[in-house]
Amino acid sequence: MASKDITAAIATKTAAENDGPRVGVRHLQSFLIFLGFSVGFMQRTNLSVAIVAMMDRNSTNPDFPEYDWSEQTKSLVLSSYFWGYFLMQIPGGQLAQRFGGKIMLLFSVGIGGFLTIFTPFGAQLGDWQFICALRFLQGFCQAAVYPSGQIILARWAPPAERGILVTLCFSGMQFGTVIIMSISGILATSKFGWPSIFYVSGGCGIIWSFMWLLWGAESPRQSKLITPKERNYIESALEVLSKSESNTTPAKLPTPWLSIFTSVPFWALNITHCAYNWGYWTLLTQIPSYIKNVFNKNIQSNALLSALPYAANLVFGLCFCALGQVLLSKKVFSTNASRKIFNTIGMWIPMAATIPLAFVDANSSDLAVILLTLSLGINSAVFIGFFVNYIELSPNFAATLMGITNFGATLMSMIGPLVVGVVVTDTTNPNQWRIIFYTMVFSYFIGNLLFITLGGTKVQPWNEPVKRNANRVQQTGE
């Protein structure tokens, strides 16, 4: 009898998967998350581009104040967001787990929007100290963005579509950065001056919040827009029909901390994320300084060249996403093989490109820019590599896993510039910069090696701790 039930369940699941609509509300949810990530990153990076106009003593617009801040003060202002963001990572994952991804994503982007709009007034009220406080609060609130996205995707993305939906969502990071970097120069020189950079990015956050409030949903079962056919397709594919009928919801499940921290696939994922952040953010934030000082080519002063690495990451990410979906649909690779292959592309090819970047001739600055752009573009293959792995290891605790790993990964992105400051005492010395390149190569190599050897895509036993504990009680008779 049990065998017949299992066969019937498999047949039902297969039929539901085959009958699933090609485009549906799950894609709308992913697009809304994409926009939310875009707006969140517009708010996150707006100060790094606005501060140039805020400190411009040669500004021709006398209607807006300019600030005479030292480089040390400038660094404090720019880093204040990340301190709040860093401290709230693990609690942010727990809050998303407890209250749901929809509420926390709404809170993160919406409150961030209000704080962003208030930033110009804050500068006038309390100078750089007030801006630091606002940015700290903004980072504090937006720490739940990633975990919220993961927990929503865990309930909306069927296994066969996880790669494409996760990539679509996380591409919002690059899209938002490209947009704000592209329009900031125009906004700063408009009649509204540099404050308009904050008004636009903050206003987008408020507008997105209303859209999310209207059309966003925690799960297919809570959506008012979804058809019964699509809901059955998603739930059947995720094998959650039986769970939805139980009294236990993911929000009520106790977090299995010990099981998580003793899980080998989780540690492989954790180290991979940290290694990726070390390499990616070092490439993104420090190599432009290397190109400027060693090759005398300032790509940061050129809006087009500054946005180019982000644009390349966005375009390459969507291309890898389409390729990965085709390969999975044709069953060329298993899910496990696909994740590891694309993660290898996203970390080891940039690693290989980093080596010649360290030895480019001083007269070949354009080649250095090309190598940097290609490295950052190909990096995006990890979106269908380890970025999807949170949902696969534990759909119920994807937000918690993301909070834990992003805590360490954010720490890596904060330590990276400090290491550069200690190692590179002469910014024109290519030999000192090569030490930084070597750390990136080592980081990418070790991170991906652990992922392909110790990582996995199977749902972990601790994903359902209540059921696991119930089975243990039955077996022991306690």
Image (cartoon, rainbow, N blue to C red):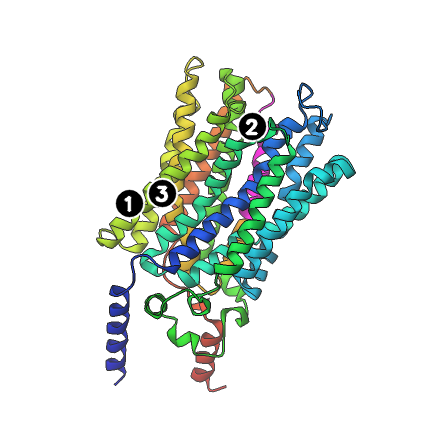
In this view, the residue in front, 179 or 164, is 179
- Badge nearest the viewer, 2 or 3: 2
Counting other residues with Cα less than 10 Å from the Cα at mark 1, is it few (<14), some (14-19), or many (20 or more)?
A: few
Nearer to us: label 1 or label 2: 2
Q: Where 23 falls versus 197 (above or below)?
A: below
Nearest the viewer among 10 and 416 is 10
Q: Is 104 rendered above or below residue 449?
A: below
Q: Quadrant of residue 236?
A: bottom left
Disc sitting over residue 185 in the figure: 2
The residue located at (41%, 61%) in the rendering is: 156
* The N terminus sits in image quarter: bottom left
Q: Identify which amino acid the numbered label 2 is placed on.
A: Gly
Task: Judge from the rendering whether residue 214 lies leftward or rightward of residue 231; answer left or right.
Answer: right
Residue at image coords 30%, 50%: 338
Query: 10 Å neighbourhood of mark 3: few (<14), some, or many (≥20)?
Result: some
- Left or right: 71 with respect to 310? right
Instruction: Say which residue label 3 marks.
Output: 318
